Image (tube, rainbow, N blue to C red):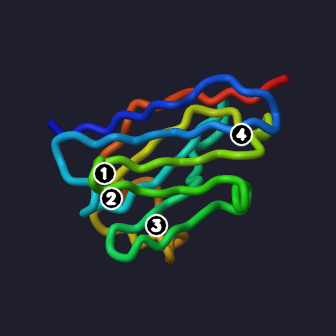
Amino acid sequence: QVQLVESGGGSVQPGGSLRLSCVASGFTLDHYAIGWFRQAPGKEREGVSCISSSDGSTYDADSVKGRFTISRDNAKNTVYLQMNSLKPEDTAVYYCAASAWVYCRTYNYYTVADFSFWGQGTQVTVSS
């Protein structure tokens, strides 16, 4: 059974850090690009970060550039999202998703629909 499971969410004060994990089962992550997305109440799902399978190239949305870092550990079949200097506007449900064809260096050519497998999400709340 193909499955992605996110973990690591929680509540943190502004300026704090969290590390999200996305663990795959039923398939090998290193054949897929992995994206992290987030969705806040009343807003559309937006892409946050992406890491390619072919060369490890990455994409980060302008809103998180310099604060979030995506990485992958193929041996553990896991992708991470290190989130530093968190802001209240980062509050959302965070999802990871896998795509067999997305190349993250040209991320803006793709849409949410290009990602085939999705996790169930993990809540991140940034509040004082």
Cα–Cα gap, marks 3 and 4 = 22 Å
The mark that comes first in sequence, 3 or 1, is 3
Q: Secondary structure at mark 1?
A: loop
| Residue designated by label 1 | 116
Q: Secondary structure at mark 2?
A: strand
Query: In which image quadrant can residue 30 be found?
Result: bottom left
The mark that comes first in sequence, 1 or 4, is 4
The mark that comes first in sequence, 2 or 3, is 2
Label 4 CA crowd tier, 10 Å (few <14, some 14–19, many 20+): many
Q: Quadrant of the N terminus?
A: top left
Q: Nearer the viewer, residue 56 or 125?
A: 56
The mark that comes first in sequence, 2 or 4, is 4
What amino acid is found at the position of numbered circle 1 in the picture? Ser
Q: Nearer the viewer, mark 2 or mark 3?
A: 2
Q: Secondary structure at mark 3?
A: loop
| Contact, mark 1 vs mark 2 (Cβ under 8 Å) | yes
| Residue designated by label 4 | 90
Query: Percent from the top left, x then y, of residue 34?
Result: 40, 56
Q: Nearer the viewer, mark 1 or mark 4?
A: 4
Query: Percent from the top left, x then y, of residue 44?
Result: 60, 43
Cα–Cα gap, marks 3 and 1 = 12 Å
| Contact, mark 2 vs mark 3 (Cβ under 8 Å) | yes
Q: Is residue 2 above or below residue 98?
A: above
Cα–Cα gap, marks 2 and 3 = 10 Å
Query: In which image quadrant can residue 14 be found?
Result: top right
| Residue designated by label 2 | 99
Query: In which image quadrant can residue 22 be found?
Result: top left
Q: Secondary structure at mark 4?
A: helix
